[in-house]
Image: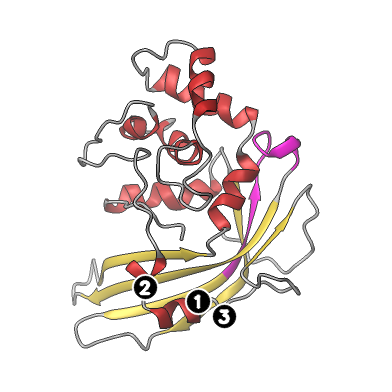
Amino acid sequence: YFATGEWIGIDAIAEYILWFGGDFGTELQLIHPGLIDMSYTTEEECVAVLGLVARVRTKLPYATNNVSTCIDASFGNVIKYQFTGKLRKPILISEWNIWSDNDFSTALFGALDTEESARYSCETIVDVCEEEGIDSSDTCLERWNELPASDDGIWIDGDSRYCRMLHGSYARENTFHCPHVTFTPEADGNGQTKCFESKRTTPEEYLASGQIEFLQTARVPYDSPNPNLVVFPDGECPDVEIFELF
């Protein structure tokens, strides 16, 4: 389940979404434009359950062996919202949860877990965030390599390399995220401490079982043991119709 963190406010949500089109990490392309289920709507709020298939391609030079990996995967969005009746702000979104296959985050960050990524992250920690006691790239890399990749091969929101890879790219542009990447745990401006202890979130904590089953029906367009996730290493990405996002 990819959404193991919280993003508060429009700017923070935009940062998260635009990570897939940023300088570090990945680019995102839509393969299947989506399925929609509105049956969870009530008199109090609308609930849109959106399933789609997208291709995530790791960017150079951070990719393994300096060769892009393609990951075609199912994604889901469960959006709760209300119509306000206001002309300028007609819709109020109260909650937006994102779902992906259990193996997606480790497949993605595993493909980015390279020496180049480590150096990129340590440049952020040393030069941008200026963590006390971490005064050189060599010192940072030593601490970096002592970290586990993730928590139990599933969660990426704990005291791990994968969590810092994600937030380190944010901190390059916005030092609000520096407490999320430093090795000493520290609360940010919202009072949240990230990349320290995983919440070990499961999809069932946020989504109904029927919603998860619906999202899993958006499947990759190949014969595969896992219909919701296929990894193509070494740039061997099959040709599919792409709907450009950004």
Dot 2 or dot 1: first in sequence order is 2
The crowd level at tag 2 (other Cα within 10 Å; few <14, some 14-19, many 20+) is some
The crowd level at tag 3 (other Cα within 10 Å; few <14, some 14-19, many 20+) is some
Does residue 209 appear anywhere in the picture? yes
Label 2 element class: loop
Q: Position of residue 43 (x, y in %)?
A: 21, 88
Q: Position of residue 3 (x, y in %)?
A: 41, 57
Residue at image x 35%, y 51%?
A: 5
Amino acid type of disc 3? Thr
What residue is disc 1 on? 215
Give the distance between the C-alpha atoms of the residues marked 3 and 1, in whole angstroms: 5 Å
User: Residue 192 is drawn in which quadrant?
Assistant: top left
Give the distance between the C-alpha atoms of the residues marked 3 and 2, in whole angstroms: 15 Å
Label 1 element class: helix
Residue at image x 35%, y 71%?
A: 79
Considering depth in this image, is 105 or 33 the residue closer to the camera? Answer: 105
Label 3 element class: loop
Q: Which quarter of the figure is the C terminus placed in?
A: bottom right
Looking at the image, what colour scheme do you see? secondary structure
Asked if the magenta segment contains residue 155, the reply would be: no
Amino acid type of disc 1? Leu
Number of marks in the rendered image = 3
The crowd level at tag 1 (other Cα within 10 Å; few <14, some 14-19, many 20+) is many
Does residue 206 appear anywhere in the picture? no
Mark 2–mark 1 contact, CB under 8 Å? Answer: yes
Dot 3 or dot 2: first in sequence order is 2
- The magenta segment is 53-67
Residue at image x 64%, y 35%?
A: 62
Q: Position of residue 219 (x, y in %)?
A: 63, 75
Give the distance between the C-alpha atoms of the residues marked 2 and 1, in whole angstroms: 10 Å
What residue is disc 3 on? 217
Q: Which mark is residue 207?
A: 2
